[in-house]
Amino acid sequence: MDVGRTRSGGLLVRDALRGGESILLPVRLGSCSGAPNSFNRNMAYDFPSVIEYGLDRSAAVLARGFSDYYVPIVSNPGVLVQMARMDSVDLAVSRVLVRDGVAVGGALIARRGWTCRLAGMAIIPEARRTGVGRAGVLQLLAEAKARGERSMVLEVIEQNEPAVKLYEACGFKKVRRLLSFAGPGTTDAGVTTALAEVDLRDMAEVVTHDSLPDLPWQLSGETLAQLSPPSVAFRLNGSWVALSNPAVSPVTIRGLITEHAVQGQGRAAELLRAVMAKFPGREWRVSALWPEELAPVIAGAGLQPTPLSQWQMERPL
């Protein structure tokens, strides 16, 4: 896909998939009004796909961009392939950001139905605050609109204020705060024998039907359906939980849902206490994806909030 600019500042997208047809999109360079003023319209940008640029080279660029990130992020070809399987990352529309012939960043795009997700964007340290991030976001939004998608979602670490401001300036709105938790938890051995191990796909179906309609991407039924052993799922009294490999500490709680008919009765916390008793001596954690309004469910199992939090954000296209 080639991109030029009109005199009015719009993006002119020439899409090879449409036989070279040029499409004028209603995206303006000025739409990211809060982005750094150092954006240079005269710089030459190219946006090859991760497939075109190569998995090895793309992963290396992302690794440089994430080298000093708030949390450790591993980037290698295997990780990219795993993200394609688990999170629906489309490597054919994920981009390497190339400025004046030099790769300065990368962006991963996941796709499901009418919604796409910016699953990760990283700019190498020496290219930050030079307009690269803004150029990349504009490009990604333009391409998503040209594909016919209707919204883009993302999660951004709340403490990463420059990134939050960039996304807000480009039209993203906060949906909710996402919290993280950790600790040894609280056990309840009395109900351990009632635990039933279940197929992760069955739990995914319950999440799809009975959860919040706008759950974070990684907690959705579509994502949970991609889990397989050594991840496991358990059910107790109408509540379901998905765990990473419980033989290895810390154990990550990958998903938690109570069937609609019995919600509000404390059954999810009861289930968590039961699985903590089944696998004693483990540390437990919830990544910074848990909706703030559902925090009491996790607290009921004795886990404590950790400092890291994210904003879940969305932008209509």
Image (tube, rainbow, N blue to C red):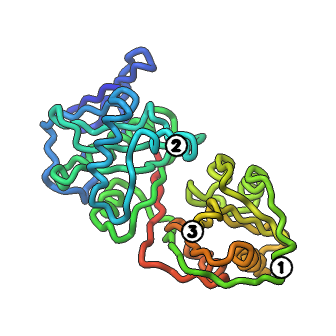
- Mark sitting earlier along the chain (2/1): 2
Residue at horizontal 35 percent and vertical 50 percent from the top: 121
Q: Nearer the viewer, residue 24 or 107?
A: 107
Across and down, in percent, residue 99 comes to 19, 37
Across and down, in percent, residue 300 comes to 66, 84
Q: Quadrant of the N terminus?
A: top left
Across and down, in percent, residue 166 comes to 30, 58
- The residue lying furthest to the top in this view is 19
Q: Does residue 68 appear in this view? A: yes
Residue at horizontal 73 percent and vertical 78 percent from the top: 277
Q: Is residue 54 left or right of residue 217?
A: left
Write down the residue under mark 3: 249
Q: Identify whether 217 is placed above or below 57.
A: below
Residue 43 figure quarter:
top left
Element under disc 1: helix
Tell me, yes or no, whether the two marked residues, 2 and 1, touch with CB atoms within 8 Å. no
Give the number of the mark in front: 2 or 3.
3
Amino acid found under the numbered disc labelled 2 = Gln
Element under disc 3: loop
Tell me, yes or no, whether the two marked residues, 2 and 3, touch with CB atoms within 8 Å. no
Residue at horizontal 34 percent and vertical 53 percent from the top: 170
Q: Residues within 10 Å of mark 3 (few under 14, many from 20)?
A: some
Residue 48 figure quarter:
top left
Amino acid found under the numbered disc labelled 3 = Ser
Write down the residue under mark 1: 191
Residue at horizontal 76 percent and vertical 79 percent from the top: 270
Amino acid found under the numbered disc labelled 1 = Val
Q: Does residue 27 appear in this view? A: no
Q: Is residue 50 left or right of residue 241?
A: left
